[in-house]
Image (tube, rainbow, N blue to C red):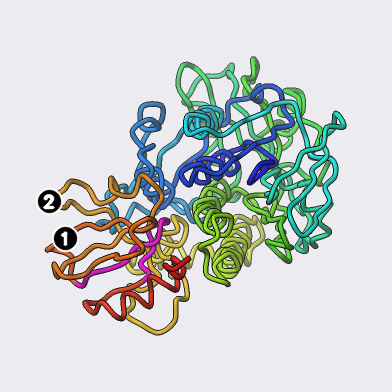
Amino acid sequence: MFDVIIAGCGPTGAMLAAELRLHDLRVLVLEKETEPPSYVRIVGLHIRSLELMAMRGLLDRLLERGRRRPAGGFFAAIPAPAPEGLDSEHAYLLGIPQPVLVDKLAEHAIGLGAQVRHGRAVVAFEEDDDGVTVELDDGEQLRSRYLIGCDGGRSTVRKLLGVGFPGEPSRTETLMGEMEVGVPPAEIAAKVTEIRETNKTFSIGPFGDGIYRVVVPVGGVTDHAEPPTIDDFRHHLRALAGTDFGVHSPRWLSRFGDTTRLAERYRIGRVLLAGDSAHIHPPTGGQGLNLGIQDAVNLGWKLAAQIRGWAPATLLDTYETERRPVAADVLDNTRAQMELLSTEPGPQAVRRLLTELMNFDEVNRYLIEKITAIDIRYDFGDGPDLLGRRQPDVELNQGQLYDHLHRGRGLLLDGTGHLTTGAWSDRVDYLAAPTAAPSRLLRPDGHIAWLGDNQEDLDLHLTRWFGNHTG
C-alpha cells in the first residue's frame, strides 16, 4: 500500500512527490504520457518559486540550465523596469525549458525514493475509511492512503471527484510557437512596433540560433485539443500583419485561450487537488506553473504530518484555506491583465493610465510583488505584520538561512540563546541566530509561524503547527 498516489508528473506533481519523500512516505507518481512533449516551451520561475528551490537545494541545478532576466515588465507586458531593492536574494526571473524543469524535479523526487510510472493514467477510484483504491487504464488496482490530482486543467481526478470548476470559458485564442523566418530582422522589428501600438498580444522576437518566438492573436475560439499547424500561423499572420514573414521550420507550435476557472474545493476526504487541476487562467504574467509549485510545497509537509499521525486536527484543512485565496487572487489579476491587452478604446485608455502610474515606484513594486508571490501573507491570526509572511533568505554565521531548510522540516531561529524546540526536535530544527530579532519559528514552507522571545508562547505555536509532542 502506498501512502500517496499522485496523478500527473508535471512540475506540481514532481515537486509534491519530492516534498513527501522528505518525510519518508511511500509515493507513486502516475504520468499518462510516455515521452516528454515534442515542443520545448520556455517557462519562467518567479522569485517565490526560486526561493523555494533554494530552500530545497535545487536552485543551482536549475541555474545551470536557465537564463536570468530582470524581474520587471510582467504585468500585462507593460514595460516597467524591475523595482530596486526587492526583498529577496533571488530577485530575477529564470527562463528554463519546461521539459528540463520537469526532468530535474522528477530526478530529485526519484533520487529521494519516489516511484514514477509513465504511460499510466487514473481512470477511477473509490475511497473508504482506510484509503483509496485507484484503478489504472490497464485495469490494475492500487491502494493508497491519499490520492492527489496534479493532472492538469482537464483533470480526470477532479471530474471523478465531482468538484465543480466554475469560471469563464475562453473568449480569445492565441497561437504561440518557435520557428525560423524568411525576412530581415529590421523588417520584422518595424512591423512588430507598428502593430503593437494597438495590439499588445502580438509579438515576434529573436530567441537565439536563428529561431524566433511568434505570438499571434486569432479571431474566434477553436478546439484547444488540436495543435495548430504552420499554415495556421501563416494565415493569421497575414490577416493581422499583411505578411506571414516567411515563417517555416517550426520547433514547436501551440495555442492557448483565456479560460479562467477555480475548483470549488481542494479536498474531499482522502482526495486532493493541486496545480492546474485546481485552477487555470491565461498565461499573462507567467504565474500558473509557479502557483502549482507553491501549492506543492504548502501541501507536502501538511499531508506528511497527517499520514505520520502528528498533524494538529485542522492542519491539512489549512492547505485549502491558505492556497485557494491565493489562486483566486491570481485569477483576478490575470483577468485584469487580459482586459489591459484588449484592443478596445476603453481598455487601451486604462492601460495608458496604468502605464503612467507604474512610473511611481510604489505601484510598480506592488504589482511585481503580487505577480512574483512575495507579497503573500497567510492569515495566522493577530500578530506583527511579519506573521504569516515568507522569510527571505539571509546570511547567518552558519551560512545561508535557506541551506538549513533542505530537509523540509520546521526551523526555530533563536536570537535569545535560551529558546528550545524541546520535544518537537524530531520535526523542528534549531538554529542559534544572534542576529535574528525577534526570534522566529519557520514552517517547512518558509512562512513565519511565530515571533517572540517567550518559551511558553513558543510552545503553544509549536503545538499549533507541529502537533502535540506526546504523540
- Kindly identify the residue that appears in the image at 62 percent across and 50 percent down: 275
- Kindly identify the residue that appears in the image at 28 percent across and 62 percent down: 412
Q: Is 160 positioned to the left or the right of 397 in the image?
A: right
Q: Is 433 positioned to the left or the right of 99 in the image?
A: left
Position of 326 relative to 209 (above/below): below
Residue 362, given in percent of the width and then of the height, sits at 34, 69
Q: Is residue 173 magenta?
A: no
Q: Which residue is mark 1?
A: 433
Determine the secondary structure under disc 1: loop
Residue 187, given in percent of the width and then of the height, sits at 52, 26
Instruction: Say what amino acid the circle numbered 2 marks.
Output: Asn
Residue located farthest toward the front when viewing the structure as drawn: 470
Task: Decide: few, some or many residues near mark 2? Use Cα within 10 Å; few <14, some 14-19, many ≥20.
Answer: few
Point out which mark residue 397 bears. 2
Task: Tell me if label 2 and label 1 are in contact, CB under 8 Å.
Answer: yes
Task: Decide: few, some or many residues near mark 1? Use Cα within 10 Å; few <14, some 14-19, many ≥20.
Answer: some
- Kindly identify the residue that appears in the image at 41 percent across and 56 percent down: 444
| Near-viewer residue (185 or 397) | 397
Residue range (magenta): 438-449
| Near-viewer residue (131 or 371) | 131
